[in-house]
């Protein structure tokens, strides 16, 4: 493959200001149980994509195909060039590219248990035991257990001499039960909204699904008779699973700098962040530091080099509550006077790279969750996302979680159903008065961060530990 | 492609004890994206994909092959044949689709060729030039797809169709205050695109976006929902009107067939054969589709039920997918609807909506791209983006006026080898619509 890529780069040299080529090979397997029965086992192996991107007259042209044949390359390049040249007819703000030093890198992740080499029946048998355990339970009307195994090999090269080769493995396991008493319906999921992890089948096993299935069954049934929160404001401790999504929606997307320039306005939206906020905007409380680190190998967002040739490195986005940087591309970094943050990525080589979160994390502070609960006189611990929604500018959000626990005098009491909180991004993060420490810090991951047109679903991670937020508006329900 | 299908079919048929279904799709898109009145990027993509499921008794295995050929398929089937006996059975297994009826389909143009990039740019440059005097710039997408699709199974299903939908979304946004409005076109026939009419409708909205911007308090308001906005609510409702939602007990409409749930003047149907939409003649399993009444004169009549759930739930299969939803027109003119409001809102477009509780049809989401304040029967102000929290069934129950004409609204699944759909929707006036907070921003 390397020699083929070299030939393509030779063809691209001299075409326009900058060009790059990506080839990906993706393997995926899904195993899905419903009500204890194997409903679907499917795979898609050796899915190849090739994508060529050229920058001509300050305009991008892109063409891709699933057909990897040397004799088709000229056709692909020709199409990308045509797209750039014709696209430049409607352009008055050209993209200049500050040249980057070439980078050569390789990273091969080796899972403990390669799901694509394991015996299929070993996986099925392991999962079936868990799936069967959720069946025949009183008031549980539906249950499912799902595993998505993923492997992607990627080659990236550009006309600046950068070359990278990676092989990565991700797994996304999840389970859900639905309870009903004939009137209402409640759901409980595990391990929550962001169950994606780097690794092989061993990552699935670490979640201890069997024991946790007992827990979610009990909670789903108990929720049917649980009260709603009736207060209009409350102190809330947000568990890691939900906090990862809160971070994702109200900081992650808000600090993607393509949104500042309206490049995502037609679909994903804008951001309330303005260029002049960088360096002085009080995004959160003093204890809040949020960083993007594509170089953290624990996360799904790891890469040696991004999809336009920027090596991975840590960038503080918010430092001690102040917005200090953005997630950038080479284009937007230049526009904002920043260094590129290594956040340009595409789902596969058939997709155009966009500014994407990689591993966006909240720096841990101190203490355990138990200590945090003990220090809370009155409030709620809430977790496990049920509904999420945020506005076009990433300013007004509303989240409902599946479950909450009332806290009184530092102790967890009864459960509440569908706690719904809302707020304005800046006010919310400034109300954060405690963040748990390193021991509570976990990398949560998703396979489904949607962005761009045509839409791309990205794998990425958020490292968080539970945190407390004061006097948060609650949407009461009778 | 036809030869390839026949070869694949004979390879599958070589395994006597297998049942099978497969689709072979050749998918192409020319996807132009623009921002700040200039090119963002143009993407040309193509892919050839085989998706298949093999059945042996009540056991099944599914796979996908990118750029398939005979060798890849034979290797895959040999692999499946070795282990399928050891898979656990699915006690809920039902036989695959049996509907072998074939529709005579209209011939279509390949719109990737009919509407080349230079033509797209010519149209958009003209629009950009016209909104410039309002200090606006345009943002959006101009998509043309061409898809060839074969659906084959061992019960004799052998269907083929082509689609070449077009979708144009143009947002015009003020450089000064970010007030934005949107106009869309979608369909299968580009000759239906009236450039002058499109520009005129967009410019009328741009004029309105010049009004002063205000915020409003949370509360219940009468609102006029644009065809796009009511269409989005109804699309969400569609998720609770299918077989799966009955099976998971999450449908509001369980035990409500034949019951009057909504006002007399609410008629909702799925009309895949309606020529005013982007027609879909077959569902993904090859079932030949017909138009289906979902709600007739306020009475809930039908769920959308595919082959699997029809068998599992002992219901009649219709195969409808909610790809072509039509909320039928009423008797009212839009100006009369506006005149009917003392203090209320016009909502153009929704954003980031999600179910809070599907059984109750409660959702939360936001407005964008043109929310206006109406006072004493006149549009008075642009309103910042607002959050609503509402039950979709309540919205339908609270419709008090329906526009006397329908607008075609395109939408796209956007991900993977995405499909483009269209609905026909009128403006509706809804009372007591619940605004729960403000974003304070546009």
Image (cartoon, rainbow, N blue to C red):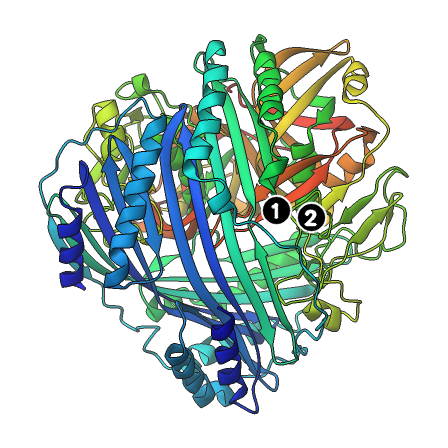
**Residue bearing mark 2:** B324
Is A436 situated above or below A182?
above
Q: Within the image, what quadrant is residue A196 found in?
A: bottom left
Q: Position of residue A134 (x, y in %)?
A: 59, 70
Callout 1: chain: B
Q: Within the image, what quadrant is residue B41 found in?
A: top left
Q: Is residue B301 left or right of residue B388?
A: right
For image coordinates 17% across by 54% down, the residue present is A164
Q: Is residue A197 left or right of residue A311?
A: right
Q: Position of residue B56 (x, y in %)?
A: 57, 86
Q: Position of residue A389 (x, y in %)?
A: 54, 37
For image coordinates 22% across by 63% down, the residue present is A109
Circle 2 residues within 10 Å: few <14, some 14–19, many ≥20: many
Callout 2: chain: B
Give the number of marks.
2
Mark 2 element type: loop
Q: Nearer the viewer, residue A316 or B180?
A: B180
> In whole angstroms, how far apart are the C-alphas of marks 1 and 2?
7 Å
Mark 1 element type: strand
Q: Quick check: marks 1 and 2 in contact, CB under 8 Å?
A: yes
Mark number displayed over residue B421: 1
The earlier-in-sequence mark between 1 and 2 is 2
Circle 1 residues within 10 Å: few <14, some 14–19, many ≥20: many
Is A100 situated above or below B173?
below
Q: Nearer the viewer, residue A376 or A212?
A: A212
Q: Is residue B141 visible?
A: yes
Q: Position of residue B280 (x, y in %)?
A: 66, 55
Mark number displayed over residue A137: none
Whether discs 1 and 2 lie on one chain: the answer is yes
Q: Is residue A358 visible?
A: no
Q: Nearer the viewer, residue B302 or B419?
A: B419
């Amino acid at each position: 493959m390397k020699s083929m890529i070299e030939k393509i780069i030779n063809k691209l040299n001299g075409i326009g200001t900058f060009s790059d080529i990506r080839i990906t090979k993706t393997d995926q397997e899904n195993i899905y149980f419903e009500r204890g029965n194997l409903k679907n086992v499917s795979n898609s192996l050796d899915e190849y994509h090739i994508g060529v991107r050229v920058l001509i007259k300050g305009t991008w042209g892109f063409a891709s195909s699933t057909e990897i044949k040397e004799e088709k390359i000229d056709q692909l390049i020709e199409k990308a060039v045509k797209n750039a040249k014709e696209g430049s007819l409607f352009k008055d703000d050209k993209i200049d590219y500050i040249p980057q030093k070439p980078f050569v890198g390789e990273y091969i992740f080796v899972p403990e248990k390669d799901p694509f080499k394991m015996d299929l029946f070993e996986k099925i048998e392991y999962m079936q035991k868990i799936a069967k355990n959720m069946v025949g339970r009183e008031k549980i009307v539906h249950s499912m257990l799902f595993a998505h195994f993923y492997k992607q090999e990627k080659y990236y090269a550009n006309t600046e001499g950068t070359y990278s080769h990676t092989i990565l493995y991700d797994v996304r396991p999840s389970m859900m039960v639905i309870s009903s008493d004939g009137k209402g319906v409640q759901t409980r999921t595990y391990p929550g909204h962001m169950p994606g992890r780097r690794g092989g089948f061993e990552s699935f096993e670490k979640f201890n699904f069997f024991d946790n299935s007992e827990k979610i069954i009990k909670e789903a049934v108990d929720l049917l008779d649980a009260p709603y929160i009736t207060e209009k404001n409350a102190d809330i401790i947000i568990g890691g699973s939900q906090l990862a999504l809160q971070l994702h929606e109200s900081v992650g997307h808000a600090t993607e700098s393509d949104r500042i320039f309206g490049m995502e306005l037609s679909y994903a939206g804008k951001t309330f962040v303005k260029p002049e906020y960088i360096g002085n905007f009080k995004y959160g409380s003093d204890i809040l530091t949020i960083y993007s680190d594509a170089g953290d190998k624990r996360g799904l967002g790891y890469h040696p080099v991004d999809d336009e040739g920027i090596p991975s490195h840590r960038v503080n986005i918010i430092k001690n509550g102040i917005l200090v940087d953005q997630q950038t591309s080479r284009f937007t970094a230049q526009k904002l006077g920043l260094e590129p943050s290594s956040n340009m990525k595409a789902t596969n080589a058939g997709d155009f790279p966009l500014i994407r979160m990689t591993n966006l994390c909240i720096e841990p502070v101190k203490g355990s969750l138990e200590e945090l609960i003990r220090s809370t006189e009155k409030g709620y611990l809430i977790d496990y996302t049920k509904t999420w929604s945020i506005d076009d500018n990433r300013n007004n959000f509303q989240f409902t979680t599946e479950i909450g626990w009332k806290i009184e005098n530092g102790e967890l009491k009864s459960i509440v159903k569908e706690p719904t909180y809302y707020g304005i991004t800046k006010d919310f993060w400034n109300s954060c008065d405690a963040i748990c420490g390193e021991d509570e810090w976990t990398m949560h991951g998703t396979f489904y961060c949607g962005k761009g047109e045509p839409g791309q679903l990205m794998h990425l991670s958020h490292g968080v530990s539970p945190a407390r937020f004061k006097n948060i508006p609650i949407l009461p329900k009778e | 492609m036809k030869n390839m299908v026949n070869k694949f079919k004979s390879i599958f048929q070589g395994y006597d004890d297998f049942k099978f279904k497969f689709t072979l799709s050749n998918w192409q898109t020319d996807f132009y994206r623009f921002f700040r009145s200039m090119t963002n990027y143009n993407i040309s993509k193509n892919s050839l994909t085989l998706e298949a499921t093999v059945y042996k008794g009540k056991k099944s295995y599914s796979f996908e092959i990118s750029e398939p050929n005979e060798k890849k398929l034979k290797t895959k089937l040999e692999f499946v044949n070795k282990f399928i006996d050891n898979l656990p059975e699915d006690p809920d297994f039902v036989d695959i689709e049996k509907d072998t009826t074939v529709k005579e389909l209209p011939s279509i143009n390949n719109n990737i060729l009919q509407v080349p990039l230079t033509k797209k740019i010519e149209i958009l440059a003209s629009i950009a030039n016209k909104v410039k005097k309002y200090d606006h710039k345009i943002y959006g997408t101009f998509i043309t797809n061409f898809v060839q699709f074969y659906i084959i199974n061992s019960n004799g299903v052998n269907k083929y169709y082509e689609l070449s939908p077009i979708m144009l979304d143009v947002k015009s946004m003020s450089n000064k205050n970010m007030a934005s409005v949107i106009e869309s076109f979608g369909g299968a026939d580009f000759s239906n695109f009236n450039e002058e009419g499109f520009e005129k409708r967009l410019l009328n909205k741009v004029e309105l976006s010049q009004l002063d911007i205000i915020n409003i308090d949370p509360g219940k308001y009468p609102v006029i929902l644009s065809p796009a906005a009511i269409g989005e609510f109804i699309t969400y409702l569609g998720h609770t009107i299918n077989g799966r939602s009955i099976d998971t007990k999450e449908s509001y409409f369980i035990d409500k067939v034949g019951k009057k749930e909504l006002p007399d003047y609410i008629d909702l149907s799925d009309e895949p054969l309606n020529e005013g939409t982007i027609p879909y003649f077959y569902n993904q399993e090859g079932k030949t589709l017909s138009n289906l009444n979902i709600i007739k004169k306020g009475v809930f009549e039908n769920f959308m039920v595919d082959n699997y759930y029809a068998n599992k739930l002992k219901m009649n299969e219709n195969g409808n997918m909610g790809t072509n939803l039509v909320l039928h027109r009423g008797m009212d003119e839009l100006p009369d609807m506006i005149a009917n409001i003392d203090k209320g809102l016009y909502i153009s477009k929704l954003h980031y909506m999600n179910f809070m509780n599907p059984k109750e049809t409660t959702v939360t989401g936001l407005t964008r791209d043109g929310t206006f304040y109406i006072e004493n029967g006149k549009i008075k102000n642009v309103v910042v983006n607002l959050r609503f929290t509402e039950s979709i069934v309540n919205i339908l129950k609270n419709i008090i006026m329906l526009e006397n004409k329908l607008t075609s609204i395109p939408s796209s699944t956007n991900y993977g080898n995405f499909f483009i759909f269209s609905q026909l929707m009128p403006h509706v006036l809804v009372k007591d619509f619940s605004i729960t907070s403000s974003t304070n921003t546009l």
